[in-house]
Amino acid sequence: MLLIERPVRLHRPLMVVTVAMTVLAAVAVVGLFTDPRELVGGPIWSKAAKFAVSIAVYTATLAGMLSLLPKARRWGWWMGTVVAACLVVEMALIIGQTIVRGRRLHFNFATASDRFIHNQMATAIYLLWAATLVVAVLLSCQRLPDRPQATAVRAGLFLALTGMALGMLMFAPTPEQRAVLDAGGKPAVVGSHSIGAPEDGPGLPLTGWSTAGGDLRIAHFAGLHALQLLPLLAFGLAALSRRVPVLRPPLVRRRLIRIAALEYLGLIAVLTWQALRGQPLLRPDGATLLAVGALVVTAVGAGALALRRSPGRPQPSQ
């Protein structure tokens, strides 16, 4: 996925976490078929399975990105280690709270123990976000040899940080929870990923995203995985440039990646807006469709303009 042309030593703690999460994902899949227990309307192993896959992809990608640093490698190593440690803590809490104790992890304030575990998870997430931000700054402040790749890596990191930050919207109390809090009560659950629908309501296969209301996890997911998609786009454009002359100038590929990043940011904004209005992903209204259509039109137009202005393309006579 990353265009690494020289032998590199990938960040060992991150790669250890990648291997461990891959093994855990396999164990969790077995658990999905062998353990009949359910939690918040779904199989008790589903959260562990989804998080294990997501963490494995994230840590492998970040390890590759850290290998690109020409300077400040020690800073990069420490930030990668913080990320690895935070993700190990998060997965340990997921397994301990959901699989072992059989209780929900996110937004759970039912008992003192639940509140303590939830707060430890939140702390790990905030540290993870801060360490990823430092990695993004390190990669943005240094000159990387492949300019299109550098653009993709930097944009992917900042979009991933945006996706992580959007996840914090889930910690806000729902109107019903706010009413209990304002009355001096202590609700067992504070926060939700669903808008206008119960968390244990119907959801899409595999992801569990709500089909009855809005779901903030969708924009969160989209933002996080820009970390892989934009470098993958850079790789694809580089491969195509061998057969498509107009893509050979690095400047053209950088323009296309910047356009993709801006349009992707727009998509994240639309997905967030859709969720906050309590609208299921697969049942968009006219306003959502209009917004998505505008993104498609501007992406095609900007892309065509970028190719037309290619340095290697003959310009029309004046």
Image (spheres, helix red, strand yellow):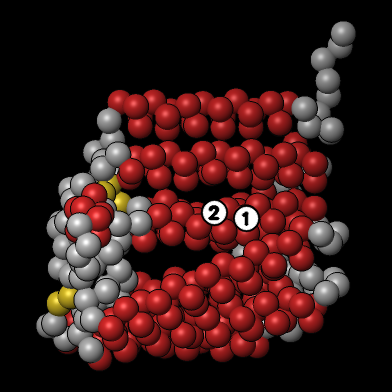
Task: Count neighbours of disc 1 (C-alpha within 10 A) and say few if under 14, some if 14 to 19, many if 20 or more.
Answer: many
Q: Which mark is residue 158?
A: 1
Q: Is residue 120 left or right of residue 283?
A: right
Q: Residue at x 18, y 75 (%)?
A: 39
Q: Are marks 1 and 2 in contact (CB under 8 Å)?
A: yes
Q: Which residue is mark 2?
A: 162
Question: Image quarter for residue 304?
Answer: top right
Q: Residue at x 72, y 81 (%)?
A: 77
Q: Residue at x 63, y 72 (%)?
A: 131
Label 2: element kind: helix
Residue 122 appears anywhere in the view? yes
Q: Is residue 170 left or right of residue 124?
A: left
| Amino acid on which the number 2 mark rests in the picture | Thr
Estimate the x, y position of residue 206 in percent, counting from the top left.
27, 64
Pick the residue in front: 57 or 241.
57
**What distance separates the C-alpha of mark 1 from that of mark 2?**
6 Å
Task: Count neighbours of disc 2 (C-alpha within 10 A) and say few if under 14, some if 14 to 19, many if 20 or more.
Answer: many
Q: Is residue 205 above or below residue 39?
A: above
Pick the residue in front: 62 or 77.
77
Label 1: element kind: helix
| Amino acid on which the number 1 mark rests in the picture | Phe
Q: Residue lying furthest front in this view?
A: 184
